[in-house]
Image: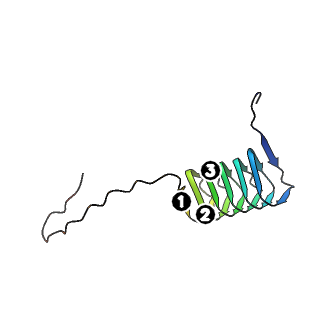
């Protein structure tokens, strides 16, 4: 893009990195990462293996991940195999994707809890009250 400061980094399928990665850029990983990844946007190729936590604004996962994933927008493709917990704001999972972990929305958004209403005991033979 002309006039844009955004950058895009690619880690090829023949590359193995041992250590954490922190990038303000968009990252495309086809290789193996043994460490945590923190970046703006992550695209993981089908042959890629990540052994560590992933934190990104948006992530599109297609390979193997052994670690937690935290993303505002997360897409888990059918070729993905995730072994770890998943935290998200928006989540899309293709049929066939495998995730062994817990799913939870990001804690950054407060969840409104309904006000507690004391329950009245139902008397025998009485019609149950249905709130509409």
Occupied quadrant, residue 70: bottom right
Q: Which residue is mark 2?
A: 85
* For discs 1 and 3, the disc positioned in front in the rendered view: 1
Q: Earlier in the sequence, mark 1 or mark 2?
A: 2
Q: Nearer the viewer, residue 54 or 77?
A: 54
Q: Residue reaching furthest left?
A: 125
Q: Earlier in the sequence, mark 2 or mark 3?
A: 3
Asked if the residue at tag 3 contacts the one at tag 1, i.e. Cβ–Cβ closer than 8 Å, the answer is: no
* Image coords of residue 95 (percent x, y): 59, 55
Which disc, if any, is residue 116? none
Which disc, if any, is residue 104? 1
* Image coords of residue 9 (percent x, y): 80, 45
Quadrant (top left/top right/bottom left/bottom right) for the N terminus: top right
Q: Earlier in the sequence, mark 1 or mark 3?
A: 3
Residue 79 visible? The answer is: no
Query: How far apart are labels 2 and 3 at the CA level?
Result: 14 Å
Residue shown at the point (74%, 31%) measured from the top left: 4
Asked if the residue at tag 2 contacts the one at tag 1, i.e. Cβ–Cβ closer than 8 Å, the answer is: yes
Is residue 47 shown left or right of residue 102? right
Element under disc 3: strand
Q: Which residue is mark 3?
A: 75
> Dot 1, how many residues are within 10 Å of its Cα: few (below 14), some (14-19), or many (20+)?
few
Query: How far apart are labels 1 and 3 at the CA level?
Result: 14 Å
Query: How far apart are labels 1 and 2 at the CA level?
Result: 8 Å
Residue shown at the point (24%, 64%) measured from the top left: 118
Q: Nearer the viewer, residue 86 or 61?
A: 86
Q: How is the image coloured?
A: rainbow
* For discs 2 and 3, the disc positioned in front in the rendered view: 2
> Dot 2, how many residues are within 10 Å of its Cα: few (below 14), some (14-19), or many (20+)?
some
Residue shown at the point (38%, 57%) measured from the top left: 113
* Image coords of residue 52 (percent x, y): 72, 63
């Amino acid at each position: 893009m002309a006039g844009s400061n955004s950058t895009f980094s690619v880690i090829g399928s023949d590359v193995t990195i041992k250590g954490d990665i922190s990038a303000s850029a968009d990252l495309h990983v086809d290789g193996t990462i043994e460490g945590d990844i923190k970046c703006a946007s992550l695209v993981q190729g089908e042959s890629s293996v990540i052994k560590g936590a992933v934190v990104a604004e948006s992530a599109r996962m297609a390979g193997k991940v052994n670690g937690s994933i935290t993303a505002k927008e997360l897409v888990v493709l059918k070729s993905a195999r995730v072994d770890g917990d998943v935290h998200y704001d928006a989540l899309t999972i293709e049929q066939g994707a495998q995730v062994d972990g817990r799913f939870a929305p990001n804690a950054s958004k407060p969840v409104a809890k309904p006000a507690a209403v004391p329950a009245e005991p139902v008397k025998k033979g009485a019609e149950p009250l249905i709130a509409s």
